Amino acid sequence: MQMAKSEYKLCFVYLHSPRHDDALDFCKDVLNDPNVASFINEKFVAWGGDVSNSDALLLALGVSPLSFPYCALFNSSGSRISLVVSVEGYCDSDELLEVLEKSIEEASSSMSEARTRNEAAENDRLLREEQDVAFRASLAADVAKEAERKREIEEEEARLKEAENKRLENERIESENRRKEEDRALALKNRRKEKAMRLKPEPEMSVAENVTKIAFRMADGSRVERRFASQESTLNDVYDFVDTLENVSETKYSLVSNFPRKVFHRTDELLIEVSELSSNGAMLFVQSEEER
């Protein structure tokens, strides 16, 4: 349509529906007629589409043809696209040419008016541009100077804003880190207090049977020993003891033996049933599992 408008021609549209019996004959006998093809190519801007495809289907929904094949002429020279004529159903070459020639005659006046109107508008536009050149030239230096001043102000404002945002972000991060550390310290404090209250008592030194002595090596290198009643204490009790230690600052950790390496988890398994811990002299390392 835009090409037809720029060339001051009508737009010839053909909508093809392969489901209609006359469609193929119309293409072969009429549109393929040299006289018809030459006339359409010379006088119009032509467009065709199969209604099984989206563009042609949308147009078909807009014009709502009663039958196929469907041919139409559209005038796009005005502010709105208007239908000049449509041919619905099969027609021969002579009939189609007659309709097209008559439509050109009827639309010629409106096309001429559109051409005259557009040329006058174009002349007015060129005249206004020429009149504006001198005015724009006189303002160009001032506009450039003002733009540079605004740019410098905006850059300075952006720099100050970026610095302020960075300061606020650093304060937020520091505050968040302090809060996390405070929460972590409080969680450790509460854990030590809770586990100390429920921790099973350590066997007396005079008791030698069914006692497991375990040495714990902390992350900071310090060492702590503790005796457990092996027939009563579980791995959970071992973890509860480690949870009470002040020099255990991890909220998540595992107890690991070195030779052979084995990770002992929090379970209700009795120490006497854990071969690696059933006798005295076992050593467990406190291995942190916290993400840093």
Image (cartoon, rainbow, N blue to C red):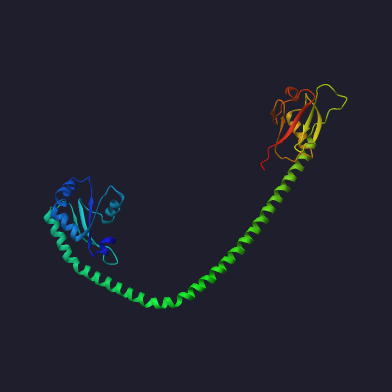
Position of residue 118 in the picture relative to residue 160 (left or right): left
- In the depicted view, which residue is nearer to us: 165 or 267? 165
Q: Position of residue 44 (x, y in %)?
A: 21, 60
Which quadrant is home to the N terminus?
bottom left
- In the depicted view, which residue is nearer to us: 178 or 198? 178
- In the depicted view, which residue is nearer to us: 64 or 258? 258
How many discs appear? 0
Vertical placement of 90 versus 109: above or below?
Answer: above
Vertical placement of 272 versus 67: above or below?
Answer: above
Please tell me which residue is depicted at 35% across the width and 76% down the height of the picture. Answer: 130
Task: Give the quadrant of residue 120.
Answer: bottom left
Which quadrant is home to the C terminus?
top right
Q: Position of residue 258 (x, y in %)?
A: 72, 28
Please tell me which residue is depicted at 54% across the width and 70% down the height of the picture. Answer: 150
Q: Position of residue 33 (x, y in %)?
A: 14, 52
> Among all residues in the image, which is located at the extreme left?
94
Please tell me which residue is depicted at 48% across the width and 74% down the height of the picture. Answer: 143
Position of residue 64 in the picture relative to residue 144 (left or right): left
Please tell me which residue is depicted at 59% across the width and 66% down the height of the picture. Answer: 157
Task: Give the quadrant of residue 132.
Answer: bottom left
Vertical placement of 57 versus 274: above or below?
Answer: below
Position of residue 106 in the picture relative to residue 157 (left or right): left
Q: Position of residue 77 (x, y in %)?
A: 26, 66
Position of residue 7 in the picture relative to residue 219 (left or right): left
Vertical placement of 56 versus 43: above or below?
Answer: above
